[in-house]
Image (cartoon, helix red, strand yellow):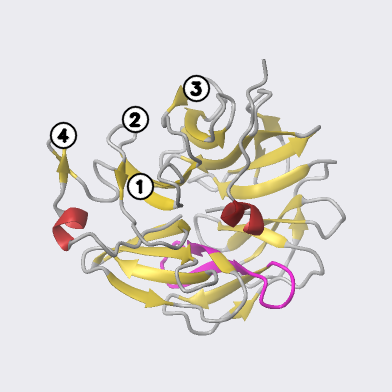
Amino acid sequence: MTPSRKRIPAPLRVLAACGLVLCCTSCNDDQLTGLTVGGDSISPGTSFPLLFTSGRHGNLDIFLMRSDGSAPRDLTSDAGFDHSADWFPDGYGFKMAFMSSRDGDYEIFVMLVASRELQRLTDNTARDGFPRWSPDGSQILFTSDRDGVFELYVMRADGTNQTRLTWNPDDDIGGAWSPDGSKIAFASKRDGNREIYVMQGDGTDLVQLTHNMAFEGRRVEWSPDGSRIAFDAEQNDNADIYVIDADGTNETRLTHDPGDDRWPLWSPDGQRIAFTTDRDGDQEIYVMDADGRNLLRLTNSTGLDVLDSWRH
């Protein structure tokens, strides 16, 4: 029997793209940098490498959990919707870039976890979201509809020099940097159907990778070695996870379930892929080997769960 499906919360449906984040207004510094659960110190990228967005408390918040799905910990408490972020380690600790509706519309923020120092990077009446750090941390790729439709933009890590990369009358979404930072993969409806494209980091040399009659690309993700790209595609009102070589060859379907499988994310070693599915009635996070075998459920809640970042 096909499980009953729950609709994706409006904040994620509105932008219909990729995602991650962190902002904490009620946590003190010890809760973020020195908290222990089950004897393990909680710090992003060590014993708790998984960050995910969840609606389990009625609002979209960011959680940490172990790589086996255990000990989930709520990290945000703002009344707005905080989600779809990316994190970047630097010499001062972990920085979080994320999107939030806390100021009335969706903007992009960056927070230094250890000090809780928060900086707003965008400030307009449009919807800015889905930030992605460049591999060297110098730039942030993001999606915005400030010019009428969703397009891809890039800015410096401090929010300056915001530059539009794509120019298309239909939405361009789901942007992701290649591991070496030279290219960007994304999804676009510029040919009438949403397909996967790759371009240089400055927006030039556009190449179409997929040519299917399917809805593709809520999230587009490069493998850690840059050789493959994972994405979700919808055919006959059903979404599944696919991988394709970075040159557009060897497209392979990994999931075959009547439920919707979306938002793929590679493990840091490239051996596994996590994704969100409603196959058991709720939007939960599962992980599988990169060839689609050895499926394991990581979360079990009554709200949407989407894995946003996976670090060593």
* Disc 3 residue crowd, few under 14, some 14–19, many 20+, Cα 10 Å: some
Label annotation for residue 63 = 1
Amino acid under label 1?
Phe
Where's residue 276, x and y in %? Answer: 54, 37
Pointer 2 or 1: first along the chain:
1
Pointer 3 or 4: first along the chain:
4
Res. 227 visible in picture: yes
Where's residue 25, x and y in %? Answer: 29, 65
Q: Which residues are magenta?
A: 130-150
Q: Do labels 3 and 1 touch, CB within 8 Å? A: no
Residue annotated with mark 4: 38
Amino acid under label 2?
Asp
Pointer 3 or 1: first along the chain:
1
Helix, strand or loop at label 4? It is: loop
Helix, strand or loop at label 1? It is: strand
Q: Which residue is rendered at x = 71% and y = 34% of the image?
A: 250
Distance, label 2 to label 1, CA atoms, is 14 Å
Between 312 and 56, the one lying in front of the other is 56
Which of label 3 and label 4 is nearer to you? Answer: 4
Distance, label 2 to label 4, CA atoms, is 14 Å
* Disc 2 residue crowd, few under 14, some 14–19, many 20+, Cα 10 Å: some
Amino acid under label 3?
Leu
Distance, label 3 to label 1, CA atoms, is 22 Å
Residue annotated with mark 2: 68
Helix, strand or loop at label 2? It is: loop
- Residue 171 falls left or right of residue 56: right
Which of label 3 and label 1 is nearer to you? Answer: 1
Residue annotated with mark 3: 295
- Residue 90 falls left or right of residue 210: left
Which of label 2 and label 1 is nearer to you? Answer: 1
